[in-house]
Image (tube, rainbow, N blue to C red):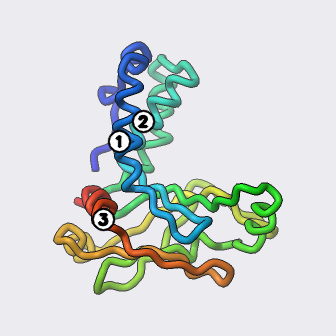
Amino acid sequence: MEKLTRADLLSLEQYSIERKAFREKVMAHKADRKIHIGPNATLYFEDRLTMQYQIQEMLRIEKIFESAGINEELESYNPLIPDGSNWKATFMVEFSDVEERKVQLGRLIGIERHTWVQVAGFDKVCAIANEDLERETEEKTSAVHFTRFELTPIMVASVKEGASIQMGIEHPNYTYTVTLGEASRASLAADLG
């Protein structure tokens, strides 16, 4: 998948005009890319459009319009765009109650390493997580992890031909599996070269 360049971004003024419609388009797109694995874990699969939205929002919020600042945002977010042989996702461990969240994050250390995807007929592919920096301590894991799932060429071909996809977590304190619906499967298939 092609990385974003400055030419792909709208000026702050143009973005303010188009923001509402663009946001609606992105939210609809994201809906098929949000995969709940059990009641408290979600994978938010990123792609070029979701990263363009993220960058545009950062530029708007921070009022960044100079080249250096724009380039910095591109350098930060482009690595989250899939490369054609993988899926990249923001993995969130979600508990609404603050106290329960603290307890559960302590119980779920390493959960990101127990998260997997599986293309029908192939072995599970475990997440490669947090390549940018360590996100857990001896006491707890983070509520947010950045993950990558590397697929073999034959897995990629299989997904593009319509193979089903399962995702899951096999952690001693949190085990769930989900089979993707067709809309989600097709959206993720579009990420693959």
Q: Residue 50, how many percent across, how many down?
A: 40, 43
- Which element is circle 2 on? helix
The residue shown at (33%, 56%) is: 83
Instruction: Check disc 1 and report the residue beneath it.
Output: 49
Residue type for callout 2: Tyr
The residue closer to the viewer here, 21 or 157, is 21
Image height check: is 65 above or below 48?
Answer: above
- Which element is circle 3 on? helix
Residue type for callout 1: Leu
Total numbered badges shown on the rendered structure: 3
Q: Earlier in the sequence, mark 3 or mark 2?
A: 2
Q: Residue 112, how many percent across, how many down?
A: 58, 69
Image height check: is 48 above or below 111?
Answer: above
Q: Which residue sits furthest left?
A: 161
Distance from Cα at disc 1 to Cα at disc 3? 17 Å
Residue type for callout 3: Arg
Image height check: is 170 above or below 29?
Answer: below
The residue shown at (49%, 70%) is: 127
